[in-house]
Amino acid sequence: MANTTSNDAQVMLRMHDIHKSFGELAVLKGIDVEVRRGEVLAIIGPSGSGKSTLLRCINKLETIDSGSIEIEGEFLADTDEHGAAEYADAAKTREILSHTGMVFQQFNLFPHMTVLDNIMLAPIKVRHITKAEAEDTARKLLAQGHRSLDLLVLTHPHDDHVNGVLRLMHWLPVRTLVIPAAADITQAPLSDILALAEANHTTVVRVDAQQTIAAGGISVHLYPEPCAGQEDGSMIVLASIGDYDTLVPGDVDTTAEVKFLSSCTYPSVELLLVGHHGSKRSTSDAWLDAIAPDAAIISVGYNSYGHPTSDTLERLQAHHIPIYRTDQMGDITVHLS
């Protein structure tokens, strides 16, 4: 390459006379861009005008035909004596691009991985830092947006419901932890969770009767035994924000549903977290008729039980309830207008 460095250290990005075509279609025609330290640049234009192509050229997700790209004084690409773009070698390219980042229009997250693991992946694979270093950086970044949890409710202590709690509490302070009084607190991992809660000065509430807890603008009504009727001490949780109600029944089966419907006061709900991951022994027709949800979320991953079962899916469909599944969609966010 003709050039290797630039003398202007205040220029973070400089693109000069950028040309890019796809076949006979010229998308970028002589584009010049310069961004200095501390500046924020917005590029606007109609769909198909080349905005995304320009951004992708900065990260070498697309290669330019001619022109030059300079990042923090280092030339990623420059025009050779034949008028074509010549890129830095592979090692130099990796070094230069290690100082850039891009947020895609589609998030391109791996749905089978946690948020933490998604953030850690690129630094480990691209920058070759250790897993411990990547996790420490990722946790600090996540903590910038979420300082603490007001309330954490454990409906019951089964491993598939509480195994991630220790990692969560190590990363994010929890102000109040709620568990059913019937849960065996001597068995791991619940015993370890409670030990960490004590060390973190987290308030622990053991629920043995119906009660309502207010936290962060949300009203959380707790239905423990005998209302929920589960032998494992599972609670049913009703979370309300204004007039929007979400019912979280844990792993309740149809027997517990009958007991709940006959002995507890409850509203119709806007959202149902389907019981027991869509087991055929939960989410009965009577249950759906009574609580009348507008939508249902099935929290489920790969499993050997066949959850969610076709029986449960057919019952939800027969009640014309839209179904959202984490095994197909990944993380699901509910936005209230």
Image: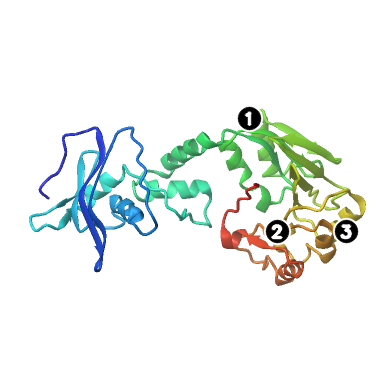
Q: Residue at x 47, y 53 (%)?
A: 107
Judged left or right of residue 169, residue 20 is: left
The CA span between labels 2 and 3 is 19 Å
Say which element carries label 1.
loop
> Depth check: 265 or 189 in front?
265
Q: Gap in Å between the C-alphas at discs 1 and 3?
A: 39 Å
Circle 2: element type: strand
Q: Give whichever of 208, 324 is nearer the camera.
A: 324
Dot 3 alpha-carbon crowd within 10 angstroms: few under 14, some 14 to 19, many 20 or more: some
The amino acid type, in three-letter code, at marker 2 is Ala
Circles 1 and 3 in contact, beta carbons < 8 Å: no
- Between disc 1 and disc 3, whose residue precedes? 1
Tell which circle, 2 or 3, labels the residue nearer the N-terminal end.
3
**Circle 1 is placed at which residue position?**
200
Q: Which residue is mark 3?
A: 258
Mark 1 or 3, closer to the camera = 3
Q: Is residue 323 left or right of residue 146?
A: right
User: At 38% across and 46% down in the image, what residue appears?
Assistant: 123
- Reading the image, the residue beneath label 2 is 296
- Amino acid residing under circle 1: Asn
Query: In the rendered view, does 53 fall on the left or right side of 305?
Result: left
Q: Estimate how packed mark 2 is, as few (under 14), some (14 to 19) or many (20 or more) residues with alpha carbons within 10 Å.
A: some
Q: Can you say whether 153 is above or below 230 in the image?
A: above
- The kind of secondary structure element at disc 3 is helix
For the residues labelled 2 and 1, the Cα–Cα distance comes to 35 Å
Q: Amino acid at mark 3?
A: Val
Rendered position, 296 above or below 73:
below
Q: Residue furthest top?
A: 201
Q: Position of residue 323 (x, y in %)?
A: 67, 62
